[in-house]
Image (spheres, rainbow, N blue to C red):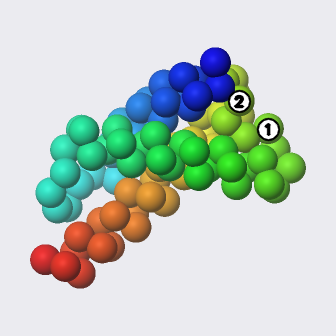
């Protein structure tokens, strides 16, 4: 169930992160969803290292960690796209 919950939370986090950071370059909802899944993984991993529970399922701590990871990844993606354009 861990992998499925990471993917589901990542999809939600990616879409919410796209609302927080509107796109300035290419990439739509599919890119946001993929980056959201990756961001949820990174956010959950970092939260686990820092002593939190990480992304362990649908709970109060998983979604904020996933959203922060997704926002950070979307921000990095926007920086890379802006520099290469």
Task: Name which quarter of the figure residue 58 lies in.
Answer: top right
The answer to which quarter of the image holds residue 1 is top right
Q: How crowded is mark 2: few (under 14 residues within 10 Å), some or many (20 or more)?
A: some
Indicate the quadrant containing the C terminus: top left, top right, bottom left or bottom right.
bottom left
Crowdedness near tag 1: few (<14), some (14–19) or many (≥20) residues, C-alpha within 10 Å: some
Q: Residue at x 48, y 25 (%)?
A: 8
Question: CB under 8 Å between callouts 1 and 2?
Answer: yes
Question: Is residue 42 in sight in this rendering?
Answer: yes
Asked whether residue 58 is in view, the answer is no
Q: Position of residue 26 (x, y in %)?
A: 15, 57
Q: 61 left or right of 82? A: right
Given residues 67 and 57, the one toward you in this image is 57
Q: Name the residue under label 2.
A: 56
- SS class of the residue under badge 2? loop
Q: How many marks?
A: 2
Please say if 82 is above or below 3: below
Give the SS element for disc 1. Answer: loop
> Which labelled disc corresponds to residue 19?
none
> Where is residue 23 drawn, in percent x and y?
23, 54
Q: Position of residue 56 (x, y in %)?
A: 71, 30
Q: Mark 1 points at which residue?
A: 53
Query: What residue is at 27 percent from the left and 52 percent from the top?
Result: 22
Cα distance in 3D space between marks 1 and 2: 7 Å
Q: Nearer the viewer, residue 74 or 20?
A: 74
Residue 85 is left or right of residue 5, and the answer is left
Residue at the extreme right: 51
Instruction: Give the residue displayed 61% in from the left and 40% down from the top.
Output: 64
């Amino acid at each position: 169930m861990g992998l499925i919950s990471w993917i589901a939370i990542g999809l939600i986090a990616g879409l919410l992160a796209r609302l927080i950071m509107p796109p300035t370059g290419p990439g739509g909802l599919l890119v946001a969803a993929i980056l959201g899944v990756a961001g949820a993984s990174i956010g959950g991993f970092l939260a686990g290292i820092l002593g939190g529970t990480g992304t362990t399922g649908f709970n109060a701590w998983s979604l904020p960690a996933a959203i922060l990871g997704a926002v950070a990844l979307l921000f990095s993606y926007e920086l890379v796209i802006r520099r290469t354009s």
